[in-house]
Image (spheres, rainbow, N blue to C red):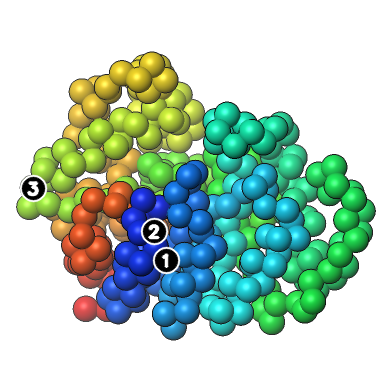
């Protein structure tokens, strides 16, 4: 299993680049850059990371079809592939109506259909071919000035049943959401059979199991509230009435950390002592994760985050001692 980090979009771009350098020096395999609105732009940060690293895979995880014309996305993906020497991966996701419609004023409809059409058009351009015809209501007749020297892998970051099925069929892999448990990963593998699985993980190491899980309690409550009663929570063993209540509280703006005990945090995060975290890493590997990406919340010093992950990975035998 590959291991990586994803710098928080709330860090400065310079700090994100420093975190990527630390990750490569520590022997980690991947650095992924997310694009939450309205934080740092993913392509600029990913390009800077690619320029100062030599070995790590640089992933965009994820960008969406609404804010970039398909030709612009192809141009940026092409440039990143060149800067990285073929180490880049393009992650696409459907985004959500709050960001697109409520914040940015972009009409949001048919998210999975849009993502499928956009992916097909993007593949044409990234293959160096001419794209002709209507794409998302626009008439196109264009081609890149040159094809990328290497194929740019495209993965989908999605979570609904239809989206997972489409992504497994149309993309080069799936990127699973934060709080994806071993049970959920195993279910996705068995039902949808994606060619590759990347997963985001919430991570914390402390001297005690309770101390680490306390650090993730509010974060876990928030993300469980986002998922609600769903396959993600069900296959983690989370009571579905609890998941629904966490979602209700999130939408109402009410605190919910008091509903999430240590066992609940442990079921959906990689957390605890170094030994606990090593067990968590191996459980995800054995469930079928090919690349595990630890998310950075922007609060810990980059050196602490990387050091803790490496200690757990060495304990698990996933990086060189």
Give the percent coordinates (x, y) of residue 173.
59, 57
Residue 303 as seen in the image, left or right of residue 80 = left
- The quadrant holding residue 320 is bottom left
Q: CA distance from mark 2 to mark 3?
A: 25 Å
Q: Name the residue located 42 percent from the left edge and 20 percent from the top edge.
A: 251
Mark with earlier residue (1, 2): 2
As helix, strand or loop, the secondary structure at mark 1 comes to strand
As helix, strand or loop, the secondary structure at mark 3 comes to loop
Residue 312 as seen in the image, left or right of residue 57 = left
Instruction: Look at the image and tell me whether residue 23 can be seen.
Output: no
User: Which residue in the protein does label 3 denote?
Assistant: 208
> 175 or 315: nearer the eye?
175
User: Which residue in the protein does label 1 denote?
Assistant: 31
Q: Name the residue located 42 percent from the left edge and 80 percent from the top edge.
A: 52
Dot in front, 3 or 1: 1
* Numbered tag placed on residue 266 in the rendering: none
Instruction: Look at the image and tell me whether residue 225 can be seen.
Output: yes
**How many C-alpha atoms fall within 10 Å of the one at disc 2: few (<14), some, or many (≥20)?**
many
Q: CA distance from mark 3 to mark 1?
A: 28 Å
Q: Are marks 1 and 2 in contact (CB under 8 Å)?
A: yes
As helix, strand or loop, the secondary structure at mark 2 comes to strand
Give the percent coordinates (x, y) of residue 181.
38, 43
- The quadrant holding residue 161 is top right
User: Which residue in the protein does label 2 denote?
Assistant: 6
């Amino acid at each position: 299993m590959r291991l990586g980090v994803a710098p928080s979009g709330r860090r400065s771009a310079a700090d994100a680049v420093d975190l990527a350098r630390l990750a490569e020096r520590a022997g980690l395999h991947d650095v992924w850059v997310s694009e939450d609105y309205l934080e740092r732009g993913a392509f600029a940060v990913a390009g800077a990371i690619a320029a100062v690293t030599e070995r790590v895979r640089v992933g965009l995880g994820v960008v969406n079809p609404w804010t970039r014309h398909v030709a612009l996305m192809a141009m940026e993906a092409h440039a990143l592939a060149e800067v990285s020497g073929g180490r880049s991966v393009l992650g696409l996701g459907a985004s959500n109506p709050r960001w697109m419609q409520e914040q940015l004023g972009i009409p949001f409809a048919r998210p999975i259909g849009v993502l499928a059409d956009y992916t097909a058009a993007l593949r044409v351009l990234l293959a160096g071919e001419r794209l002709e015809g209507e794409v998302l209501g626009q008439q196109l007749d264009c081609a890149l000035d040159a094809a990328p020297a290497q194929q740019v892998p495209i993965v989908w970051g999605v979570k609904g049943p239809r989206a997972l099925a489409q992504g497994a069929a149309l993309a080069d892999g799936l990127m699973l959401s934060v709080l994806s448990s071993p049970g959920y990963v195993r279910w996705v593998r068995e039902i949808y059979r994606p060619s590759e699985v990347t997963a985001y993980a919430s991570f914390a190491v402390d001297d005690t199991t309770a101390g680490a899980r306390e650090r993730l309690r509010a974060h876990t409550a928030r993300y469980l509230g986002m998922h609600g009663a769903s396959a993600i929570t069900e296959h983690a063993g989370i009571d579905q009435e609890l998941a629904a209540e966490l979602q209700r509280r999130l939408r109402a703006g009410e605190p919910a950390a008091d509903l999430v005990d240590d066992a609940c945090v442990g079921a959906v995060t990689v957390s605890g002592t170094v030994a606990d975290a090593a067990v968590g890493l191996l459980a995800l590997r054995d469930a079928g994760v090919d690349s595990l990406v630890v998310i950075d919340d922007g609060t810990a010093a980059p050196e602490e985050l990387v050091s803790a992950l490496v200690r757990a990975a060495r304990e698990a035998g996933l990086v060189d001692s």
